[in-house]
Amino acid sequence: MARNAFIIIDMQKDFNVPGAPFRVDCGLEALPYIEEALKATRESNVPVFHVFRYYRANGVDCEITRYDAFKSKGFHGCTVAEDGAQIMESIKPIAGEYQIVKQRWSAFFNTELDMILRRLGVKQVILAGVQTPNCIRGTVWDANSLDYEVIVLTDATNAKTPEVHQANLFDMANIGIKLMTTAEYVEILKKDPDGPEATFQERIRSEIESAKNLPEPYDMYDYTSKYGEYWK
């Protein structure tokens, strides 16, 4: 079973190349680090996931807040079957790597990602890609809500500006997300092909079991005894 999963988000041409419809200005700065992290991951026991957007050409599945921008670009931008929707050549998926299509910010929203991760036994996700305030952040928050431990590779993610990127990393660290450079991640893989330790769930479960505290009062939901006949 896999302890970790390496997830690359939205590294498509239409988010990254100059002149692209939805270009993230600093997105390409993350690409060499993603390449490095991906190479090391492919030599490890950590499964790789490529998460990317495909919009239908009439905008029917585009976010309502992005629809006007999508329409203004002639419904071009991560559009199914167009070249711009393709993942950057240097990090294209290879056989055995998972590909997840999304139409919203989070890689988890209305996708099969959570189901596959749980089937593989994954406890921790390692995130790379663009952009930090939108799809990286949305995925981080959902992963945290689903009880995954999360590592964000700080140099293998990016945003429109360095300031936006750093501000979002600051917010993530404040809720307990682990921040790591690509070099640190690669060094861990050299020592352990299963990747970084993920111990939160086991430790918390052990502490709860050993404490033997009642989780809630037995009459917590007995509103009749608390509030009288009105609740019958």
Image (cartoon, rainbow, N blue to C red):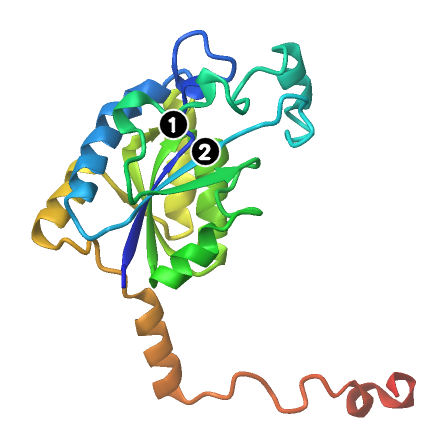
Say which quarter of the image contains residue 103.
top right
Q: Residues within 10 Å of mark 1 (few under 14, many from 20)?
A: many
Rendered location of residue 35, percent (x, y): 22, 29
Rendered location of residue 209, percent (x, y): 38, 85
Instruction: Identify whether 143 is placed above or below 219.
Output: above
Task: Give me the residue at 36% from left, 32% from top.
Answer: 129
Q: Quadrant where the C terminus lies?
A: bottom right
Q: Is residue 198 left or right of residue 146?
A: left
Residue 132 seen in the current view: yes
Instruction: Identify whether 19 is placed above or below 187.
Output: above
> Outermost residue toward the right?
230
Rendered location of residue 47, percent (x, y): 28, 49
- Mark 1 → mark 2, Cα distance in angstroms: 7 Å
Judged from the image, the secondary structure of the residue bearing numbered disc 2 is strand
Instruction: Identify whether 174 is placed above or below 70.
Output: below
The residue wearing badge 2 is 52
The residue wearing badge 1 is 11
Kind of residue sitting beneath label 1: Met
Precedes in sequence: disc 1 or disc 2: 1
Say which quarter of the image contains residue 59.
top right
Task: Give me the residue at 79% from left, 92% from top.
Answer: 225
**Marks 1 and 2 in Cβ contact (< 8 Å):** yes
Rendered location of residue 107, percent (x, y): 48, 43
| Numbered circles on residues, count | 2
Q: Quadrant where the N terminus lies?
A: bottom left
Residue in the foreground of this view, choosing between 227 and 34? 34
Kind of residue sitting beneath label 2: Phe
